[in-house]
Amino acid sequence: MEQHNLLIVGGGNAGISLGARLLRDGASDIAIVEGQEVHRYRPLLNYVGAGEASMASLERPMAAVMPPGCTWIRDRVVAVDPAGSTVTTSEGRTLRWQKLVLCPGMEEDWDATPGLREAYVDGWAGSTFVPASAALLWPALKSLRAGSVVFSVPPEPAPCGATALKPLFMACDHWRRQGVLSAIDVCLAIPGSSVLNHPSADKILEQTFASYSIDVLREARVTSVDPARRAVTIDSSTGRRTIPDLAYAHVIPLYRAPRWIADSGLAVDSSSGLVDIDPETLQHRRHPSIWAIGDGANVETRPSGGALRPQVDVLAHNLSAVGSAKPMRKYDGYTVMPITVNRRELMLLEVDREGRVKQSAPFPDLTKPRRSTWLFDRYALKVIYFRRILRGKV
Ligand SMILES: Cc1cc2nc3c(=O)[nH]c(=O)nc-3n(C[C@H](O)[C@H](O)[C@H](O)COP(=O)(O)OP(=O)(O)OC[C@H]3O[C@@H](n4cnc5c(N)ncnc54)[C@H](O)[C@@H]3O)c2cc1C
């Protein structure tokens, strides 16, 4: 039976940067199970949806980002046996581990929103969160001159859900520059009473909603989609509303962790399916040889790529500290929420698990929209991601 000291499931941001970091720290015999041939820098998907980036610019062959020295197992995990310390793959392999790190991210729960998948196939709905539809968004939005559109911010858990405002605000800015914004009815469904749960940052968002005349439905969720009527039904704090004859619906599916996590008895609950780890040490609460980071782990903070930098750091330390005299380190729940308020400026909120601001750069206030942070987010971060983060250097 194939066996590895450390088995990582998932070759996304979490799995690749952790594998690379551990190799740099001197670890050996690391294997990554990943079935996809393409790796994506997902934050750029929102810029694709605004015509500011291409899909080719954010994609790399998986082989090019796999850390040299890691064994790449081109397969998918379908079950974990915690008692036997093995995983089973879709090709019927059994892999044994000394330590297992689960980094499979989240997946779309299409069944949770009836009609949505059909509307995506029809082409009048789509979103930057679903890579196959991201490139179709801008051609649909840029030539719009009138009509109704709906956008949604997905409820938690979701991969950096607040960034769903990026394609919305960049589209509104475009329509305003084209002189057609007043002819377009823009409705936005947000899951809470505010988006960021942070008073001064939310104030900037509220001013931005008002400046584009966006009709915001709060505590709202898209409950169904009617492809025949091009209609979206939204339940919110003000009741139920159905908006028909939509020109476009940027409705993001609900998310959950892959079902094999709950089926293997490793999830915190069956609805989110997230891996039941201690959110500070990142170790599974019942199975000490299992760990998890990233979007699929119950880290009790909003998931983001930025959150992975400290998670990788803490986990790399704790994997070597466990079983030794070294104390374990604790992840404080740091996460980021970058939002473009127009096609040239971006605001950035960095907070810990308690919602306390934790700025990583010495600027006075990163929540203030700035051209420099837009340029950093659009151009510089991608270079840092591929050259440093995925190589375990951050
Ligand atoms: C549209 C969008 C915009 C975003 N914008 C930002 C942003 O601006 N800033 C920010 O910080 N974050 C952003 N994020 C969030 C960020 O991309 C994620 O937090 C990050 O990618 C999470 O990494 P991950 O490795 O946990 O999951 P993923 O990136 O989802 O990777 C999971 C990997 O696991 C693999 N996998 C899944 N199941 C299995 C299995 N059974 N067996 C083997 N492999 C498996 C998948 O193929 C995938 O490669 C954005 C996300 C999206 C979708």
Image (cartoon, rainbow, N blue to C red):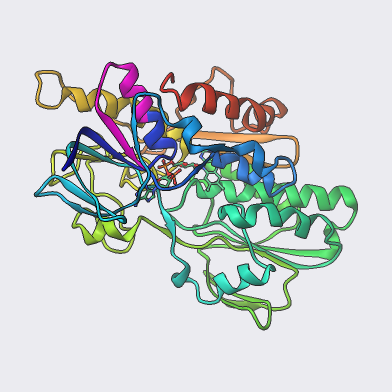
Residue 377 seen in the figure: yes
Residue at horizontal 49%, vertical 44%? Answer: 37
Task: Name the image quarter holding the C terminus.
Answer: top left
Q: Quadrant of residue 376?
A: top right
Residue 281 seen in the figure: no
* Residue nearest the viewer, comparing 86 with 359: 86
Q: Is residue 30 magenta?
A: yes
Q: Is residue 316 above or below residue 118?
A: above
Extreme right residue here? 179
Residue at horizontal 69%, vertical 28%? Answer: 375
Position of residue 135 measured from the top left corner of the image (x, y, whole percent): 68, 52
* Residue nearest the viewer, comparing 236 with 222: 222
Extreme bottom residue here? 228
Give the extent of the magenta segment: 18-33
Position of residue 195 measured from the top left corner of the image (x, y, whole percent): 54, 50
* Left or right, 196 with reference to 55: left
* Left or right, 119 with reference to 275: right
Position of residue 282 measured from the top left corner of the image (x, y, whole percent): 25, 37
Q: Quadrant of residue 318?
A: top left
Residue at horizontal 57%, vertical 34%? Answer: 348
Task: Name the image quarter holding the N terminus.
Answer: top left
* Left or right, 267 with reference to 174: left
Q: Is residue 199 above or below residue 254?
A: above
Position of residue 131 measured from the top left corner of the image (x, y, whole percent): 58, 52
Q: Is residue 154 magenta?
A: no
* Residue nearest the viewer, comparing 110 with 96: 96
